[in-house]
Image: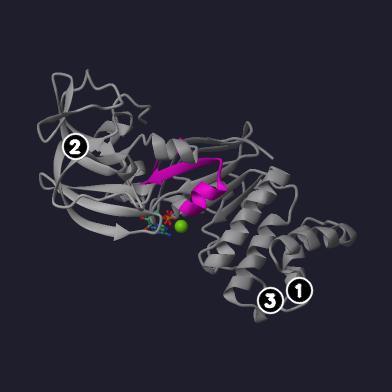
Amino acid sequence: MARITLEDLAHTYFDPAEGDVEWAVRRLDLEWADGGAFALLGPSGCGKTTLLNIMSGLLRPTRGRILFDDRDVTGLSPEARNIAQVFQFPVVYDTMSVYDNIAFPLRNRGMAEAEIAPRVAEIAELTELTPMLRQRAAGLTADGKQKISLARGLVRPDVNLVMFDEPLTVIDPHLKWVLRSKLRELHQRVRTTMIYVTHDQTEALTFADQVVVMNAGEVVQIGTPVELFEQPQHTFVGHFIGSPGMNVLPAKIENGTALFGGQPVEVANPVAAAEGVVELGIRPEFVRFAPTGIPATVTNVADAGRYRIIDTESRGHSIKLLVDEGEPIPSGAVNLGFAPGQTRLYRDGWLIGGAGR
Ligand code: ADP
Ligand code: MG
């Protein structure tokens, strides 16, 4: 196992000499602590797979270094890095049995058959493949084949790191929950560093102790699921995490006071030093109907089971609220209150007075 450090990492698939470069990874400084359960969360195209492939050695970064503990591995082959990687779509040897597929990485490292058998049995149990061990991989469904890929990624006890790249994409929804909690359980048992890549916030938040949120080739925030929810450092994080995401409204700071639509709003972050045009972020969970406050009109009510999502409009801007089922909903003209401790101002996306980049 190892602590993994990424230093000033960047990658482009195009030749920088040709100009007009699209950076898949723009700039990345990051440390993955030894033994952690991490998620790498971000929208499709933000650079997650590129980053994993750089870490595993399938891609050479355009710029920057990768260290395992203090050893520079930037130029090393994938084999020399001793990493297991599970891809989005199954990679199996169709003509081999399920057993032989799972045993493959162990045989490859020269492990004795007597040691291989119990290890394969344990991982097959975890991935619910025990009844299929003697079957040929070719006969399995896409689900089954992806379970083989997972098992192969998990079978080696001595790896530095296991990386999962959206591993449950082809798995049916019920089994997704089962496998994810098993992965989490396994991590608690073996404590190998694991990085779980996904664009799905639920998957990230349920698997990881620490979530790295990426957007457009950069890390925007690293935090526990609770920190990401309660203290988004960037409006992107507020939007992307939570359902529905944070309301982001145009606001102004004048003489140290935050204003929305000309009306003073109490905010949680220090804004006295800032002036001018900003963005106000407030999660739908923390907007309430109030006797006085920001005037708005209810435009839609959607039932989401235990709570309802209310759309309102205020001065041409849409503001969402989450309201528990059973709570009365006024109609027509209403007033909204923003919980002061949960209302924050951002400039160019970044939290004012926050950790920033
Ligand atoms: P993610 O895994 O987050 O969806 P990727 O790392 O696959 O993101 O892609 C990041 C960016 O790099 C995207 O804009 C994508 O179109 C581009 N990209 C990915 N792979 C290649 C490639 N082989 N050649 C050129 N561009 C690529
Ligand atoms: Mg990807």
User: If you read the primary sequence from the N terminus, does the residue marked by circle 3 or circle 1 appear first?
Assistant: 1
- In the image, what residue occupies the spot 13% across and 52% down? 332
* Location of residue 259 (image quadrant): top left
Instruction: Determine whether, in the image, residue 262 is placed left or right of residue 157.
Output: left
- In the image, what residue occupies the spot 28% across and 50% down? 328
- Per the rendering, the mark at residue 131 is 1
Please name the residue that numbered disc 3 is placed on.
137
Q: Which residues are magenta?
A: 202-222
Residue 227 screen position, x and y as percent: 45, 35
Residue 54 screen position, x and y as percent: 52, 48
Relative to 33, residue 170 above or below: below
Instruction: Determine whether, in the image, residue 206 is placed left or right of residue 221.
Output: right
- Per the rendering, the mark at residue 291 is 2
Res 197 visible: yes
Specify whether residue 230 is painted magenta. no
Q: Nearer the viewer, residue 63 or 193?
A: 193
Specify whether residue 218 is painted magenta. yes
Instruction: Determine whether, in the image, residue 30 is placed left or right of residue 229.
Output: right
Secondary structure under tag 2 reads strand
